[in-house]
Amino acid sequence: MFQLKWITGVVFAVASITLIAPVAQAKSRVASFVNDDDIFMALRDAARKDDAAKAAELADRLPDYAIPSYVDYYRLKPRLQQASSSEIREYLRRYNGSAIADRLRNDWLLILGQRRDFVTFDEQYPLFALDDDLQLKCYSLLSRATRGEQVAVAARALLVSPKDYGEACSTLITTLAGAGQFTPDDLWWQLRAAGETSQVSAARRLAPLLSASDAQIVQSIEKAPLVLARGVGNSALTHQLFIVALGRVSRTSPEQAASALSNVESQLSPGERALGWSQIALQASLKLMPEATTLYWSRTDGAPLTSDGYQWRARMALRNGDWTLIRRAIEAMPPDLRDDGTWIYWRARALGASGDVTEAQKLFKSIADQTNFYGQLALEDLGQKISIPIPGAPLTAQEIAPLAANPGLRRALKFFDMNLRFEAVREWNWELRSLSEREHLAAAEFARQNNVLDRMVNTSDRTRSERDFNQRFPSPFRDFMVTSTNALGLDMAWVYGLIRQESRFIMNARSHVGASGLMQLMPATARYVAKKIGMTSFDPDQVNEVSTNIALGTNYLNMVLGDLDGSQAMATAAYNAGPGRPRSWRSSLTRQVEGAVFAESIPFAETRGYVKNVLSNATYYAALFDGKPQSLKARLGMIAPKGFVASELP
């Protein structure tokens, strides 16, 4: 949430002081705990601080705790570096098949990778069920590379975000370069990617591999204008550093970078020129500069782009309404991007615009069963509207009972009761891996019965053949919502769609920036709206109260909607990113565009996904509430520059 950030910022300061007390004092503190749950929370905290002595002392006081696997995990975790292999293996054996055992295996594998103990690593890695750790994926490729295997193709697919690399992935790059599996082009691609996201430390690690000095690498990122002012030089190295600097300068001024590149184009090879223009084109696109396509992307043919580069070339063609360019941009994408539902949909639209209706219909049909933004749009392009699937047979008590007795789900409920959401969600999702679709629905109903609505929604959302949209799109607190939305003339389906995306109906949800409650209100927003609507008795502590949160949230949403000409697409973006930004994004338009084009070309990835999800949600809520098919396209509407009317637009 970025609501009303222009009014105030939110600063969090967390101070942590660990006191080393005598054993007697420590025992006295432990003895003062009210119950075993309090001791468990202290154990968890000690383990997180790597205080092995305190963790052992606290664990000893929990011999009969309801969740022994976590007691033993928190006892072992702070001393995992020193623990013997046999002790770790005994823990994994004792709790085999549990979520926390998989977590410990993850922790151990990281240590094995750091130690380069690839014999044990290769034995244990196939047993790591979740396989969701980038560092471990890099260690796995590193192990294979040290045995002489060719892993460059897999490494290129994996190494796309330098900010996430860490020691494992950085070492993998170094190893592949030393073995000749990564070429200089691979290394320069990595440097440009690091430069795009200001990952100076990642860039520095590439210096010796590129026969460049540390100073040269840092200058190309941190003092890029000076690098451009010096010109391209006479070597391949200085040419590439110039291109990196172009990307950095483009972040603040694509025009300045374009001028610098134009002055030296004759000194660069065709490939280098295309690379240089691609650096400028991406940053111009993120600023939604109308000329990004005609002045910059048009000169990038053949340049190896990042994932963002490929997609922004297509997004700017969308904003310009050039279906030929849209099709070309999408067809030039790597297969994993091209086969994403987003680009399947827009490629189908481009094919239809060129007259290839048969192929377009085929592509629409391939995603029309997806219950998401582009699945809904594809359905409409096939001549249908969005309706609620017919549910299967009602769940029986006999179907729910095994899920209610599931030890993992019950552990999750215990953690939810203790407000340990991270552990709770891990336990819950772990159990879902082996369930059938019908069992997913039963688990979702079990979550509803225990008022854990976010798990109900997320669990039910996973089914594909049998779907219950009453589980997926709940509408709790209906009385408060009807009262607030009716008084404002606000679309209740839209508000529920927003809450589903914001908080998943977690009443005490709090974001990393301080937004609170069902509608995730920033403190400044809550105070501002309370004052505007005359809520004189408002106290900031009330923001998580359901009635207050809904009243303030709906009023704020209504204010934003009125300020943005009644466009739900723009108002939704404003709710997430602040009202000034969608105004700016609209002002860069040169023509009227579909709401879907506006949504897809939002420069912030979080806000882009947010708008699409909220309006997709709202369309299903409307179908549930009205009992009839709905149109997402109508909800999205058309968006034009401020002050223009359709007849005035090119």
Image: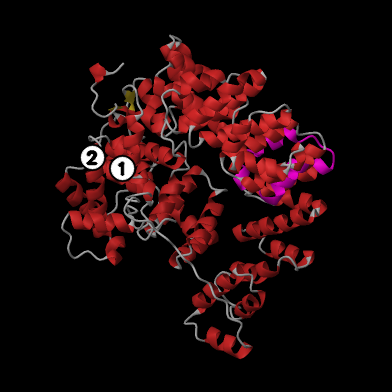
Residue 557 x, y percent position in the rendering: 26, 46
Residue reaching furthest to the bottom:
24
User: For residue 522, which quarter of the picture?
Assistant: bottom left
Q: Is residue 553 left or right of residue 244?
A: left
Where 42 sits versus 340, above or below?
below
Judging by the rendered image, the residue that carries numbered circle 1 is: 579
The answer to whether the residue labelled 2 contacts the one labelled 1, judged by CB atoms less than 8 Å apart, is yes
Q: Nearer the viewer, residue 256 or 170?
A: 256
Judging by the rendered image, the residue that carries numbered circle 2 is: 563
The stretch in magenta equals 145-174
Find out whether residue 486 is within the magenta segment.
no
Q: Nearer the viewer, residue 134 or 431?
A: 134
Q: Earlier in the sequence, mark 2 or mark 1?
A: 2
User: Would you say residue 365 is visible in this rendering?
Assistant: no
User: Would you say residue 69 is visible in this rendering?
Assistant: yes
**Mark 1 surroundings within 10 Å by alpha-carbon count, few (fewer than 14), some (14 through 19), many (20 or more):** many
Q: Quadrant of the C terminus?
A: top left
